Image (cartoon, coloured by chain):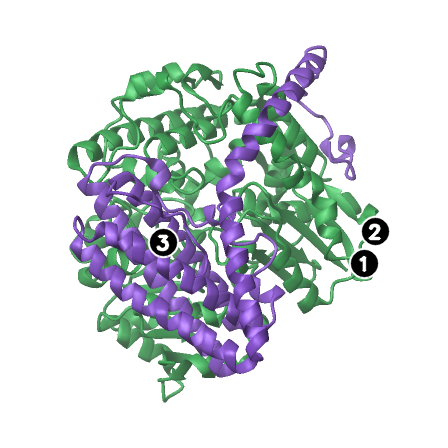
Amino acid sequence: MFLIPKSSLKKFDPERSCFVLNEFAAAEFSSAVEMLFAAKVVSNKKLSDGFIRHALDEYKHCFIFINIKNQIISEYKINKKELSFVPSHIYNKGYIYKDHFIFEKKKLNDFAIFIGANEEIAEKKLIAFSNHLKEHKPLAFKEIQNILKDEERHAEYSLRFAKNNNGFFSYKIKLAREKALSFFRHIYANSLNKFSFIFNPILIIILILISFVTHFLKLKKNIIDDDVMKNIEPNSIT
Amino acid sequence: MYYIGISAYYHESSVFLTDNNGTNCFLKEESFSRIKGDKNFPQRCLKFLIKKFDLKNENIKSICFYEKPFKTWWEIFYYSIKNPLQNKDFLIHHLKNFNKGSIFFYTDISKLINLSRSKIVYSSHHLSHCLYGLSVIKNVSDYVYVTCDGVGEGETMSIYTIDDEYKIKKIWTNFYPNSIGLLYSTITDYLGFEINEGEFKVMSLSSFGKPIYKNELKEIFDIDNFTINMDYFEFHKSPSKSFSKKLCEVFGEPHLNINEEKNFNKYADIASSAQLILEYTMKNLIQKAMKLSGKTKIILTGGVALNCKIIHSLSKQDIFEELIVPPSPGDSGSAIGAANFAFLNELKTKTLNLNTLFLGPKKNLINKKESKDNFFSKISLTNNFINEAANKLIEGKIITSYYESNEVGPRSLGNTSIFCDAKNKEAVNNLNLNLKKRSHFQPLAPILLEEDFQKYFSINKSIVKNLEWMGTLCDAKEKLYSKYSSIIHVDGTCRTQIVKDENSLTYKVLKNLKTKGSDILVNTSFNISKDPVVFDLYDVYVNMKRMNIKFVLMDDGLYQAKDI
């Protein structure tokens, strides 16, 4: 896992826990997809196999998080559709880019640092979150401890690879940069609603103006068309 | 010269390339991104095609987008802008997404190919559906073409006729928001399933209930005039919620946990009622189409046509001579319709000549040769690997298939499937619930040779063609209950596929299996719930490991997954 879900919890709140578990599941799933892509394009067979094993771990973690979430939903009778896991939502949540995989844009060494840095950050988040579950969901807590072991291993492998293939200072600088970028990505994701708060009133004014103009539009709709191919304008978008 | 059709931005994105001379390649963006239902501009598909077919301005005749981008954006905006304050959430969302949608299709495609602007053409949404329908028939003028979906370019239902000179007439249209598709999707949302994904579940669930809410739903949707009462909906007001409080007043609390028996029964009744209203509406629509066109053979396309239960129910009413729903009637298949539009636009009196259901790429076009050796070891020591695969199936093993060309449409038809012996209840349940992680109320589908169909199933001959691609349900006969009860749905139906092509590996496996005492296999798509179907050998390997399946049948042998 190399992206950071929001996970700040003061005390055990089943609904909020489900939300966080869903975010962790989304992050794991995104990571699996990225790893699978990396496995497909990297030329080194050993690295490719490593990426596949990593992807398999991430898919497994995703499944475990969803399972724990479903148990809590069932136990506490929570009926919120927003808590269901939908893979395509990872685009909107910003876990994955629409037009490229991270491996396409980063060199292998930088990719390794990116994974290592984010796995470490996410691991800390997961430790904090799992402590909230310890008392109320001891079995889930145990399962998350196993995930943590995997995550630790992933971070270690990635950072070892990065260390071996970068100079000492270059490694340190890149690692610090990745951690800072992750921090800012998190801040940005949490601030999106605040941007809406500023821009929405402007958009509402625009909408009222459009509404005024369209009030005078008399648009005709054709129920029939005697020669569709003749009447359509192929190069037009309207 | 290639013709390319593209469908994107709203439902799962897809691309279809053809030279109308035997080279066909249908791809979905989800195959590359590994995110099911990926609706983004299909740039990964296009990159693949550019590389494999060396695409450039000189060898592309035309690229066609499946609908008119601005019209699509505008029509639903225009409906909601009449009450800007009441509908502000939807309108703001719609406005913000202006630059993320298909209006910038040309900009998106220009980033990948340097193409002259005149080569980009735009079809119309329902016309693309209609033109896709031509891919499964020969005498085009014998049919009336009915399209029904949620909404496309402000249209929700359309009826077309085509003469032998390919002159296309639109003889009737219904407009947004009067949409039976949106009603069904709203019920899907209300029941707690995802829109565009959960409609299949509602259909399966409906068989467990009684249509006790049909009168309430008739108040909501007028099945004779095809009009909707918008008081019950919010899809024009909100980007995230499709139903209003008034709908909850009728049906009660939404999104209840369906695993509790009380909720399950209630939701099954609601699903059953929605299914019945859909059936009534489609019956009226088809009768209208037959009356207006004077034809009794129907091609049905659009997302609503994916509901195979209505095809089966309508056939029992003997209102038409023939009803065909092509394998991918939703927006994804419209990429093929769009390519057909480009072709027809160019040649005026000719359409594409597509002779196969398997329009996807062959496996050797997708994979590097060495990938197979990296992940799999051949376990069939003789050339008779089909016999060995059949033996494994008879022993109760689950095996995957990955051979020949990929399918078009949401259902795997054997070439990228998971099989098990339908006689073996334990294997069937294990496959459905543990490996595929499907809901308990969704049955698995059988596949068998055409010659054995009548032994176990019955069907009205008017819809028999759809059996080739699992496009309809059929009824189980008594003999099926005694031997293969695990594949029969609670209402006594099965979503059966028949195999006719004697050269296909699927046919050979079934033929061999027959000699060992079993006529039917369970056939389900090669994926885990919420994942796309496997595309390349990496996906095959990862999915086998995730599901703990050991064997895969390929073009040249039976293989076992290695440990890496």
Residue topped by disc 2: B116
Query: Residue at 49% across / 16% down in the picture?
Result: B225
Q: Which sits earlier in the primary sequence, circle 3 or circle 1?
A: 1
B109 vs A29, left or right, is right
Instruction: Give the Cα distance between marks 3 and 1.
Output: 40 Å
Q: Residue B176: x, y in percent?
A: 56, 23
Residue topped by disc 1: B57
Q: Residues within 10 Å of mark 2 (few under 14, many from 20)?
A: few
Q: Colour of chain A?
A: purple
Q: Evaluate if marks 1 and 2 touch, with contact meaning CB atoms under 8 Å apart.
A: yes
Q: Nearer the viewer, residue A63 or B165?
A: A63
Quarter of the rendering containing residue B53: bottom right
Residue B294 visible in the picture: no
Query: What numbered label is drawn on residue A22?
Result: none
Residue topped by disc 3: B529
Q: The chain drawn green is chain what? A: B
Q: Which sits earlier in the primary sequence, circle 3 or circle 2?
A: 2
Compared with residue B270, is residue B407 higher up or lower down, i.e. above or below? below
Compared with residue B303, is residue B422 higher up or lower down, i.e. above or below? below
Query: Residue at 26% across / 33% down in the picture?
Result: B256
Q: Residue B385: x, y in percent?
A: 37, 81
Of all residues, the one furthest to the top in this rendering is: A216
